[in-house]
């Protein structure tokens, strides 16, 4: 039964992590997978999370199942982060949230919900995007349409072509947006552009789906929610797949949330009952540990403040590295202008390096990046930045 099975291609980003692990050159630098690293190149546990875990270990009374939609406090706190404390959409009971297995799990729930419970025939996805977006919608059998997002010449948002492509998106089509820190480009719409998109979406009758995996990594928790909140103000229905992998550093605990917003509380409750049916046949109910830690941090003003500080530290370190990287490339003799990297948001930068240049970085210098030219700026440290910039100038 199995002998005919062909080997599956490796995930282009996760496969890179395996190759990096196997790399024997000591000077190796990993700018591949999107994981935050501190000034020492480590991915530490967030202090508030560690404290919450200590409390959980002491206080936990049972390992009984969670409900299908997970921890109620976690879901309530998630809505406050997404929509703002006391937002109308929350007060009106229009939002329903299910704890999920990371942002990926939330996206899969969203895709299943769209496929089974709506008439949507198409989902519009930016090019480029995170490769799992296409894979997830292909897996459930929804037609994918692409909208242009990145202008290679200007190294900026391809606004005119984005509008031209999305003008083709019709009533009932799903349009997928990255809430902030677009992966892989690091380029987000401006507040004015978000307003234009929200208006266009409401007029055309799209179902907006927000993938919100990096809240707090661009400019702050509230600032980064601008796009999502602008859409929610203008729409009866919105879907959100959010993740705590990055902003809580809970990568291996698989903590995220699927949230749906409906026209009123009754519609939301009915739709959400179908979400629970979907979860029941996928994995029955989620695991407790990571989401309990998040709920504990968010419910305790001191722990929450500590987390917000540490998140700001992560964000600011990345911004510092962006500036230093651009400066040093100039000093080492790069003739190309890399200033565009400073304006990009989040961990990723679309560097403009070609696949051939990325291959040379790996082969000649043990520097690993995604072949699209995406680099994880959080992988840059004061210890590796000189070698990195020298190598890049050599392959340019
Ligand atoms: N969406 C985007 C754009 C991402 O970059 C990621 C990356 O990890 C995710 C979703 C999902 O993350 P996770 O499933 O680890 O929470
Ligand atoms: O883009 C990244 O690097 C992160 C991590 O299948 C990731 O989003 C990459 C690939 C993948 C799952 C997570």
Image: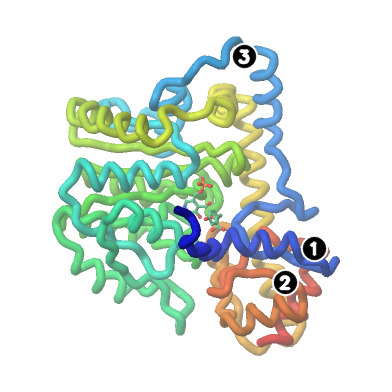
Return the residue nearer the eye: 208 or 25: 25
Q: Position of residue 80 (x, y in %)?
A: 42, 32
Secondary structure of the residue carrying numbered label 2: strand
Whether residue 262 sits left or right of residue 354 in the image: it is left
Q: Which residue is mark 1?
A: 382
Mark positioned earlier in the residue sequence (2 or 1): 2
Mark positioned earlier in the residue sequence (2 or 3): 3
Q: Which residue is mark 2?
A: 367
* Residue closest to the far bottom: 335
Q: Position of residue 374 (x, y in %)?
A: 57, 69
Q: Disc 2, ligand 2: is the CB inside 8 Å?
A: no
Q: Can residue 320 be spotted in the picture?
A: no
Q: CA distance from mark 2 to mark 3?
A: 44 Å
Task: Determine the residue positioned at 65% across, 31% down.
Answer: 49
Whether residue 140 sits left or right of residue 181 in the image: it is left
Return the residue nearer the eye: 195 or 275: 275
* Residue closest to the far right: 26
**Dot 1, how many residues are within 10 Å of its Cα: few (below 14), some (14-19), or many (20+)?**
few
Could you say which disc has been placed on residue 60 in the image? 3
Could you say which disc has been placed on residue 215 in the image? none
**Dot 2, how many residues are within 10 Å of its Cα: few (below 14), some (14-19), or many (20+)?**
many
Q: Can residue 114 be spotted in the picture?
A: yes
In the rendered image, the quadrant that contains the C terminus is bottom right
Q: Disc 1, ligand 2: is the CB inside 8 Å?
A: no
Q: Are marks 3 and 1 in contact (CB under 8 Å)?
A: no
Mark positioned earlier in the residue sequence (3 or 1): 3
């Amino acid at each position: 039964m199995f002998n005919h099975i062909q080997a599956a291609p490796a995930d282009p980003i996760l496969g890179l992590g395996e190759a990096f692990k196997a790399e024997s050159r000591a000077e190796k630098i990993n700018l591949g997978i999107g994981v935050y690293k501190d000034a020492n190149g480590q991915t530490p546990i967030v202090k508030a999370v560690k404290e919450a875990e200590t409390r959980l270990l002491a206080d936990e009374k049972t390992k009984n199942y969670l409900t299908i939609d997970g921890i109620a406090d976690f879901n309530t706190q998630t809505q406050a982060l997404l929509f703002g404390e006391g937002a109308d959409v929350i007060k009106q009971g229009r939002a329903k949230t299910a704890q999920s297995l990371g942002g990926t799990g939330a996206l899969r729930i969203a895709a299943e919900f769209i496929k089974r419970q709506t008439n949507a025939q198409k989902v519009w996805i930016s090019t480029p995007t995170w490769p799992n977006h296409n894979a997830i919608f292909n897996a459930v059998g929804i037609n994918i349409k692409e909208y242009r997002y990145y202008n290679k010449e200007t190294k900026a948002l391809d606004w005119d072509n984005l509008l031209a492509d999305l003008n083709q998106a019709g009533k009932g089509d799903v349009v997928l947006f990255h809430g902030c820190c677009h992966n892989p480009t690091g380029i987000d719409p401006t507040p004015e552009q978000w307003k234009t998109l929200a208006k266009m979406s409401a007029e055309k009758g799209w179902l907006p789906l927000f993938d919100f995996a990096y809240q707090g990594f661009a400019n702050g928790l509230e600032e980064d929610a601008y796009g999502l909140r602008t859409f929610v103000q203008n729409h009866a229905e919105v879907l959100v797949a959010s993740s705590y992998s990055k902003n809580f550093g809970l990568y291996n605990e698989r903590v995220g949330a699927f949230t749906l917003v409906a026209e009123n509380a009754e519609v939301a409750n009915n739709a959400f009952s179908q979400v629970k049916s979907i979860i029941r046949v996928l994995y029955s109910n989620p695991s407790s540990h990571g989401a309990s830690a998040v709920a504990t941090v968010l419910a305790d003003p001191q722990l929450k403040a500590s987390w917000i500080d540490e998140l700001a530290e992560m964000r600011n370190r990345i911004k510092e590295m962006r500036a230093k990287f651009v400066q040093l490339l100039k000093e080492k003799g790069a003739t190309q202008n890399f200033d565009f990297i400073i304006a990009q948001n989040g961990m990723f930068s679309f560097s403009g390096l070609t696949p051939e240049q990325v291959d040379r970085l790996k082969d000649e210098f043990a520097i690993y990046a995604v072949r699209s030219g995406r680099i994880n700026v959080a992988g840059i440290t004061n210890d590796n930045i000189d070698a990195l910039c020298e190598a890049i100038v050599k392959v340019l």
